[in-house]
Amino acid sequence: MSGSNESVRADASASHGGVRGHEFQSWFPESGSVDMADTSTNITEETIAEMRQLAERYPQARSALLPMLHLVQSVDGRVSPAGIQACAEVLGITAAQVSGVATFYTMYKRRPGGKHHVGVCTTALCAVMGGDILMDVVEQKLGIGEGETTPDGLFSLERVECNAACDFAPVMMVNWEFMDNMTPESANRLIEDLAAGRVVHSTRGAELVGWKETERVLAGFPDGRADEGPAAGHASLLGLDIAADRGWSAPPARAVQASETTQEEAQ
Amino acid sequence: MTDLLTPVLSANWADERAWKITNYERTGGYQGLRKALGRTPADVMGTVKDAGLRGRGGAGFPTGMKWSFVPQDNPNPKYLVVNADESEPGTCKDMPLMMASPHTLVEGVIIASYAIGCEAAFIYVRGEVVHVVRRLQQAVREAYSAGYIGKNVLGSGYSLDVVVHAGAGAYICGEETALLDSLEGRRGQPRLRPPFPAVAGLYACPTVVNNVESIASVPSIIANGAEWFASMGTEKSKGMTLYSLSGHVQRPGQFEAPLGITLRQLIELSGGVREGHELKFWTPGGSSTPILTAEHLDIPLDYEGAAAAGTMLGTKALQVFDETTSVVRTTLRWVEFYKHESCGKCTPCREGSWWLVQLLQRFEAGTAVEGDIEKMLDLCDNIGGKSFCALADGAVACVTSAVKHFRSEFEAGYTTPAWELFPYERSALFAAPKGAHA
């Protein structure tokens, strides 16, 4: 099976790098491709047992496919051919069906990522507020572009889309933990601290451990760190603080009922 | 007259370890559930209907009515699916809610499940927010241990299982039928309706899909009554809701207020627009809702008020941009988002969003040619309403509304790059370091 995949890859690269004629030119040369040439894997019987455990959580086993692919990434650092095969076998579907799902979702990586996966939000609001500058700063600092991994395997970089933290813009993510209200200075410091192995905490979350560890939590295997970090960031609490200052609150339940009773009595 | 801000959902966010079950219970948590279990499911559903709660995920469909569409005589299992895939650009209310007080959502899930008669519920949360996932996982485990979830909930004879399910990075999965396909372990692509999920949803069984904030509003409605909830808000838009203010304002943040507050009031609470600047344009509810300008500062931010202004309330994600911001650049960036997130199922959206980006890049670079505005609007006409789901409509809404309000800026794109007209660094909160581009 891996042989036929390699020949498909060879054909594809020939059409990209070969003589430019009437052959189809994809605007998305990377899309849909899982690196089938790299067959290395760390998947064990234990991984397969955990996959079965995930499948049992759902009324229909296939619902566990997304969590299972997160688990594959936590073990192999990417969606590996062996991981695809394992998912297929556990669920009783084809490897092509698993690949079809894996290639649809941007969180699934087809090439090995870094120990720390860094994201810079460049959707409109963050971009305007400084996200574009941050992307440039981080690219220069790491010496890589988006979608790339540093040669030492420490960092991978991604241009992320709106991460639902717009009141903390501009926002970065490390291993899918929030890094709020970033500046060029704090972005540089973040990279330096992580590179030096210093302890870094998310501004609204846990200590930054690693992308693979995050993937295991997303697969549905908690890491016992839910109690780290605050309940909320300052922006989340702004309205609450103002209401407290001015003595504003929702109407008390009894008062509403009482006033209605009074009205009824009056009528 | 109710106060300008009315924290209910956010009331406990500043509490010490608000996410823990004991702290949630201390402030009245799970009282709504106890009350609900003492009543019939139909009665609970009736209260939510009477309260006038409307969907907080964007469309504003009455939540109680949605529940009532689930056929109770259908022999198949029924399901509740919470849409926690918050990823509409600008939208940032559900994540802080679930991070600070996940039990508010979990309690709502149990009450809603009881009302519609389902024994399995799923919380589909976007994957890119691991700490929110952690807090949800823990809250569900705590609720199992406390007997709020599981077999025979609080001795009522009612049983329920709840699964926290992390997505994998696809905006389209916030569309309810795409979410269901994704939850079935497939590519997240929307389904043609009818049948609607209420009849044939998850595993082709009757399914209710509700937004996080909608479900999180249920415990307070049951605990305090429909009249209490309806005493806040406007005639057809009842209750309190989370408004998310972001962008060029003094202090961005979450504001929980009765429906109908205005942007002017919210910006005043925030301390005003960025020092020395003025409001240029804004979105009422995320990037899929047509943009508005300073002349709309006083429209009531409820479902009707937004519609009357030619836009939609959406997710109440108020993104504020000041006069330094290029409308062309911002629109391009939004459309690039839709291009990337188009699932590819429908040709008008898949191809059209790609072509919109090509055109907008020319406007941004100042290399558009006479007639490109008309071409772009014609393209929009061939995308919006021509696809299975609303992603396509969102992709064109930001373009058509931008042209409507700022046509001259697009005309300037025939001759001048946007970054010359609006140097990008001026919009940012900080200067670009030497060598970095703005």
Image: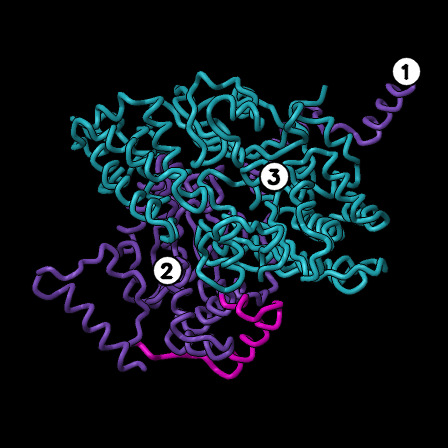
Chain colours: A purple, B cyan
Do labels 2 and 3 touch, CB within 8 Å? no
The region drawn magenta spans A38-65
- Taking B63 as reference, is B363 above or below it? above
Residue B379 occupies quadrant: top left
Q: Residues within 10 Å of mark 3 (few under 14, many from 20)?
A: many
Residue A243 occupies quadrant: top right
Query: Which residue was labeled with disc 1?
Result: A266
Question: Residue B432 or B159: which is nearer the viewer?
Answer: B159
Q: Amino acid at mark 2?
A: Ala
On whether disc 1 and disc 3 are found on a single subunit, the reply is no
Query: Which residue was labeled with disc 2?
Result: A195
- Taking B420 as reference, is A232 above or below it? below
Query: Which residue was labeled with disc 3?
Result: B55
Q: Amino acid at mark 1?
A: Ala
- Taking A193 as reference, is A82 above or below it? below
Q: Is residue B109 toward the left or the right of residue A100 in the image?
A: right
Q: Residue at x 69, y 36 (%)?
A: B8
On whether disc 1 and disc 2 are found on a single subunit, the reply is yes
Q: Viewer-nearest of labels 1 and 2?
A: 1
Q: Residue at x 50, y 64 (%)?
A: B185
Q: Residue at x 41, y 48 (%)?
A: A172
Question: Residue A255 or A13: which is nearer the viewer?
Answer: A13
